[in-house]
Image (cartoon, helix red, strand yellow):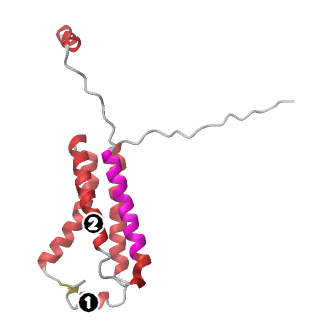
Amino acid sequence: MTIRTKTPTLLDNRSVPVHAKLAAAWTSFMFLYIYVDYFHLHKPGVIDNLRAGVVFEFDTSPMLLTMMLASVAIPALMVMLSMTLPARVNRATNLVVASLYIPYSLFNAVGESWDWAPFYGLSIGIEVLLLAFVLRSAWTWPRTPAVPAGPATTDLRQNAR
């Protein structure tokens, strides 16, 4: 009689670079951001207001549309910037932009009725959680100890010549 013992195999759980985590978080934020705006169009009266040239309380103008485009373009650019900027600049950029977008996301609920609280609570809640993840990931970015330029490294450089 043969006894089979099954050796458990563990899933390979390699560490994901901070750059990739940040880009993934900004990508998720962008998908949510776009879909919240899309679903917002289904609220009664929104399409009628758009046809009348009014967005929220503002008259539709080139400046308003430019500001709206900028508010979407910045997180979209953060996807690419998170993957391409050097670590130090990347960290600072993510900390600043995510910090600015948290109050901006919260502002989206201003003036809404309590009937829409579940919609805005869920959407803004997830946006803020994603931005908090960006802040945490950027804040805790792993550091590599700097190599001191003492006599030991100077000797190595001279030997290499």
**Dot 2 or dot 1, earlier in sequence:** 1
Asked whether residue 133 is drawn in magenta, I would say yes
- How busy is the neighbourhood of tag 1: few (under 14 within 10 Å), some, or many (20 plus)? some
Q: Position of residue 133 (x, y in %)?
A: 37, 54
Q: Amino acid at mark 2?
A: Pro
Q: Position of residue 53 (x, y in %)?
A: 19, 88
Main SS category, magenta section: helix
Q: Position of residue 58 (x, y in %)?
A: 18, 83
Q: Which residues are magenta?
A: 120-139
Residue 36 lies left or right of residue 159; in this view the side is right
Residue 113 position by quadrant: bottom left
Depth check: 64 or 114 in front? 114
Quick one: SS at disc 2?
Answer: helix
Q: Quadrant of the C terminus?
A: top left
Q: Quadrant of the N terminus?
A: top right
What residue sits 32% from the left and 41% below the top? Answer: 141
Q: Position of residue 122 (x, y in %)?
A: 43, 71
Q: Amino acid at mark 1?
A: Asn
Looking at the image, residue 158 lies above or below residue 67 = above
For label 2, the residue is 103
Q: Which mark is residue 49?
A: 1
Q: Residue furthest right?
A: 1
Quick one: SS at disc 1?
Answer: helix
Residue 98 position by quadrant: bottom left
What residue sits 36% from the left and 63% below the top? Answer: 128
Mark-to-mark CA distance, 2 and 1: 25 Å
Asked whether residue 64 is drawn in magenta, I would say no
